Every structure is written in structure tokens, then in C-alpha cells.
Amino acid sequence: MEFTSEIISRLFGHRLQQDDIRRILGLLSSEDREEFLEKISDVVTKLTALLEVANRVSDTLSLDTLLGRMIEITTEVTNADRSTLFLNDARTKELFARVAQGDLTSEIRFPNHLGIAGGVFTSAEAVIIPDAYADPRFNQAIDKKTGYRTRNILCAPIRTRDGQTIGVTQILNKKSGDFNQDDLSMLEAITAQAASALLNAQLHEQVMRAREEENLLLEVTTALSSELRLLPLLGKIMETTKDLLNADRCTLFMHDEKTGELWSQVAQGLESREIRFPAHLGIAGSVFTSGETINIPDAYADDRFNPDVDKRTGYRTRSILCQPVRNKNGKIIGVTQVLNRQDGPFTETDERRLRAFSSQASIAIENAKLFDEVLTMKNYNESMLESMSNGVFSVDADLCIVKANSAALRILQAGEADLVGVRAGEFFTGDNGWLVESVEQAMKSLSPVVTMDAEIRVEGGEGVSANVTAAPLLGANGGQMGALVLLEDITREKRIKGTMARYMTREVAEKLLETGEDALGGQAQEATILFSDIRSFTTLSERMGPQATVAMLNDYFSIMVDIIFRYEGILDKYIGDAIMAVFGAPFASGEDPDRAVRAAVDMMRALRRFNTERQGAGLEKIDIGIGISTDEVLSGNIGSLKRMDYTVIGDGVNLASRLEGANKMYGSHILVSEMTFGKLTGGYPCREIDLIRVKGKTKPVAVYEILGYHDEESFPGLPDVLEVYTEALGCYRCGDWAKGAGLFGEALRINPSDKACRLYKDRCDFFMSNPPGDGWDGVCVMETK
């Protein structure tokens, strides 16, 4: 009927009156009248649908509700089997649908340029496809997967009034016939009617989602801030991340800078244990190293995934989201790895949520680390204070005693309740008021105040002698926090006697007490230094074992120190297996070089007896070397406030040590410097051994070997050897190499084991073949210490 379209057009324009309809019906044949009424009915149905759209989209802002209503309306109006409404996500550039009739899914997403829907969205042009399988854009795999058969398709863009395309409506399988232009016109009219409502609902959902995420992050941040212990915090972060992303498992790996490893104490779904691996391995290691997020929708399709882990645990990993955790300075401190989102792969929204949450969690982690460090330091300090033999207590800025270790309670003979929490001025009263004044002075001057050998009156007991140090305590900003007081109990024996009795005889110590502290304050004086050392001690101790070595040293030191004390020397120190002794300090005797040499001779004789006893017991014998030098040295108490020792320093000390080591070269046991030799008043079998120039010095020193401890067995023909040796050494010094070599050879025939004669004969033989220059002075340079 040619005028049908015009009539319908007028009807839509509301220009037909009831009389017009009657008049038109009267002009039509019965056959045309039926067709006309059918057209009118169809138009009314579509007009009703438009009115229903207007009504049903105006009363809700819920996008899910609106999508469901639109799908129902479009499916019914087009007389189709299925329909899907896709909206565009401008942030991810994806088309998504919340509801699809048939195989329901909560959300479908794909790039907004793919497939038939993507093509319609991109071109903003509707399409009518009468045969889906004949169109190359149709993906037949979807039908194969679902078992549904798609015949024809109507797909139209959703436009707002200003022409913006916000989505696509796709209708499948018209129940009778194919989709036509009328269906398309009706679909476009419906979507145009609902476009604004859809856009508003989408914006409303985005706002509500952002608000929910903000509220969730606020709640999570509040919850995390209440936990200061690191391990429980990590567990809480993993549990929250799992819930936040609707995932199955979550593991937070922290970076251990000391070992270069990633570690996790708690893994969701696994037993609680520590996991460690190098920070560059696996997916987590790759994220930590690169600082880039990894989002794997199908773990088994990714080469970076190791399926052996699943085989061992029986767990099936589907999807993985792995993201670095950075601190406020942007430094990567760990990695969060989330597995198996329960409703599909992880999305960009999940990445954004995890990134935002990780930023908040990193602050809590840093705070927890700091708390752990502070707690560890606190426990360390308290343990250290408790292990100290010296008393320590602290006061706050108001001079109230805050903390005291066990030693302080013992020294002050007080209980913790008597001391802690009490003002210092209330506990230290009367004669003890000086201690409070020292604390106040330290806090005022911001520098330690030291009181040596002070007397503290203890109620109900004897006085306590102590060295007291009051030091100020400053906060991070330099503010006054209080003071720390150190009590060194010296009650049992006074400082001088207690210190000096360890390395000098009782008579010398008592004389020093009578003299006073001036002798310890530092003075330059002439003294004779003796060094002795056991030969090849390292090798010997390895053969003997630790217990036998300690037993041997204790016996050896006891014998040698008794000899040193017998000649009024003082024991300066033990240096491993070596002994350093001083003769003439702090008080000179006028014969200190002789005393040192006589002590050395007796030490060698005592060593012979010591070795005889050891060999009788089936033990190895030992050998020693002794070096002696006389020079001006600096003596006094040297060290720190907490530990001071009486000692001597100077060139004479260094030379004695070098001479002790030089014994190895000459095969000797006692070497003395020319300064010592020149001050000897007694007669000792000896010989000049060499002119040496030690390292660091330019002036050569004559060195003499003391031979008074030898007998015929230890040195056969000693007098004859000395006579020949003296003449031979004169030839050597004059450059008469041939005669000198002959004489040294004659001495060796008397005592073939005389290493000094062997050394000089070798020198003469060498110089005969390689004469030295005119500048030769006969000095031997010692390159080593």
C-alpha cells in the first residue's frame, strides 16, 4: 500500500484524528484494511516500547539494573533471541557488558576495536548481518564454545544527543525472518532514548566505585597503622590484598639487602614458613629487578612461570599479578604477587588498586621495620647493660631515675623499687649530693663529667669507692633528654695497686702507691726494654692442639715472669706468645741494662730445664729469641677512660722488638743493642754480631750477641770460636774477603753449627766474586719488621 508510510508518519506526528482513521478505513478494501491495522499495531507497539524505555531508565542510577532493563526491552521489541549491550570504558579502551542472556557472565571485556561490536563502535555505523557465518568479522569459535548457533545479527551504536558514541547494542537471531531497516530504526530510537541515562549511570558507578575504593583504602590504612610488628603486619597486608582483589592467594616478598634475597615469612594457602631465593629469579625477581608490573592472564602460557611449583604443591595457578612495592623515596623494598582472581584474569583496575594499596602498605612496612630496629636496639642495649660489671643508671630531664642495671643496684646496695622512679636528689643525699651536682653539670655543659676515685656513702653499709662518669643524653633534635651515669666500682683494691700489681712486683707497686699518681701521668726516662718470643709458635700450636698449647704457655709464662720479677723488671704486656718487659720504669735502679741481660741469660737457662722436663714427658721442646735495647722512652698510663694500662713507647721499644726477630737470621738467642752493651758493668761472654740499619731508620746500630748461658754442649769450643771470630770480623770489615772467609771457615770447624760464622763466610765468598762499591760500610739493612 503506497500511502502506508505517509499514514504512519502522520500518526507518529500525532496529526491524525479519530475521524481521519475512520475515513481511511472506509476507503480501504478488507485486505488493505488488515494490512493497515497490522502496521498501526506494530507502530503502537514500538511507540509503547519507546515510552517504556523513557519510564524505565528514568528511575534508577544502577548501571547493572539499567543494562538488564535495556536488554529486555531491545530483545522484546526486535522479537529476537538474545541481545547484549556493550558500554565503552574510556580509561581502558574496552567494551564491556555486565549481563548477557544465555550463558551468563558477570562481565565481558575486549578491546573496543575488535569483532563486529568493535567495528560498529569504531565506525559509529550500524550493521545488519543476515548470515553471521558468511561475515568474516564473526568469530565462530564463540558458538563452538557455548553450543549456541548464531544466524543473523543487528548491531547499532549508542549515541548521546551530542553525537558521542558511548557503546554498542548487539541483537542476535530474530525469531522470524531477518532483521530489517524498521528493526534498526526502532533500535536506534530506543538507544537514543536511553543513551543519556546509560552515560549517567556509568559515571555514577565510576564515582561510587572510586568512593568505595577510597573508603576501603582508608579502612585498610587505619587497620595497618595499628600493627607495628613486622611479621604480623606482612600477614595482614597479604590477607587484605587477597580480599581487595578477590584473589585466591597473595604473597608479599621483602628484599633482604644483606643477603640480596627476596623472602616471605607467610604465604597464603601454604604452611607458615620462611621462603628465600635470589632477588633476580622467577617472576617476583623479574619484577623486583625491572620495577615493572607483570600481569599474566594465563600462567601456563607464559614462559616465565615455573609449573614445577604447582606440581609439588598440587595447586593450579591460573592468573598472576605481580607488582613492586616502593617506599616513599621510590626505592623498591619488595614485591607483591597475587594469584588466581576468582572471576577472571586481573585487570588494569586491579593493577591500579594494588598500586594504591601498596603505596599505603609500604609506609606501614617502613614503620614496622623501624619499630623492629628500635625494639632490637632496645633489647640489645638492655642486654649489654645487664652484662656489664660496671653500674649504669639513667635520669630524665627532671633528674628522675628511669633505668638501672643489676650492677648499679649491687654497687648502690639498693632494690629496683628503691632506685627506679625516684628523683636523684632524694636518693643521693648528704655526702652523696656531689653526684647529683655532677649530673646537673653534665646536662648543663652537654659534656661528660668524670670523677675519679670518688666515695659513695651507702646506707647501712661501708662506703663504695668508684670512678663516676656522668654523660648527657640528647634527643634526635638535640634536645636535652637527661643523663647517663656510669659507676666503676674500685672498692676492693684501689686503682693504682690493682692495675700495677698485674705487671710488677709487690715492692714496686707499694713504692708507686707511696709516690702517688705522678709517676703514671707520663714521663720521659731511660729504660731497658726486653722482648722475647717463641719460635714457630703457630706451627707448634697447630701440632699440639689448643689445650696442650694453653697448658704449655701457662707453665712457660709463669717461669719467665718470675725471672723478670726477680731482677725487678715489670711485665708490660703479653703479646700472644711474646713477652714485653721493662727495666728502669717507673723507677730507675742504675743497673737496669745489667738486670735485663742477667734476666735474659737466666731465661735461656730456665728454658733449657723446661725443655728437659718436656722431653722427659714426651712433649715437644720450644725455642725462644730475646731482644734487648736501652733508650729514652715515654712511660705512663695510656688508654681510654674505661681501660688504661701502664706501658712505655719509643724507638727503644721498637728496636728491642726488631732485635728479637733478628735472632732468626743469626742463629742467636739473645741480641742487645750498642746502647745496652755500652752501659753493661758486668762481664758476659759476647761478640759483636753485626751493624744493622732497621726499617724506618737511617743510622746503623751495632748489635751484640750475649753467649753467657751456653755450656760446652750447647756451644762447643766457645772461647776458641770467639777468638777466631773477632779476627775474622776485623778482616770482613776491612774488605779482606779471602782471609776473612778462611778464618770463618776455621771457626766453623770448631763449631759447625755456628750460624753467624756460616753467614759471614757466605758473605765473604759472595764479595770475593762480587766486590761491593767504594761506598760499602759493612751495614746490613733489615727490610722487615
Image (cartoon, rainbow, N blue to C red):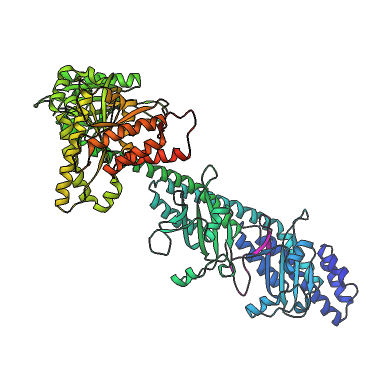
Which stretch is magenta? 86-107
| Residue 435 x/y as whole percent | 22, 21
| Residue 397 visible | no
Name the residue nearer the viewer: 727 or 240.
Answer: 727
| Residue 355 x/y as whole percent | 55, 51
| Residue 654 x/y as whole percent | 34, 30
| Residue 56 x/y as whole percent | 65, 62
Name the residue nearer the viewer: 612 or 173.
Answer: 612
Name the residue nearer the viewer: 359 or 313.
Answer: 313
Give the quadrant of the C terminus: top left
Residue drawn at 19 percent across, 44 percent down: 713
196 relative to 615 in the view: left or right: right
Give the quadrant of the N terminus: bottom right
Q: Examine the structure image and report whether residue 105 is included in the region drawn in magenta.
A: yes
Which quadrant would residue 405 be assigned to in this image? Answer: top left
Name the residue nearer the viewer: 420 or 10.
Answer: 420
Q: Examine the structure image and report whether residue 714 is included in the region drawn in magenta.
A: no
Above/below status of 246 relative to 460: below
The kind of secondary structure the magenta stretch mainly shows is: loop
374 relative to 83 in the view: left or right: left
| Residue 339 visible | yes
183 relative to 202 in the view: left or right: right
Residue drawn at 13 percent across, 27 percent down: 506
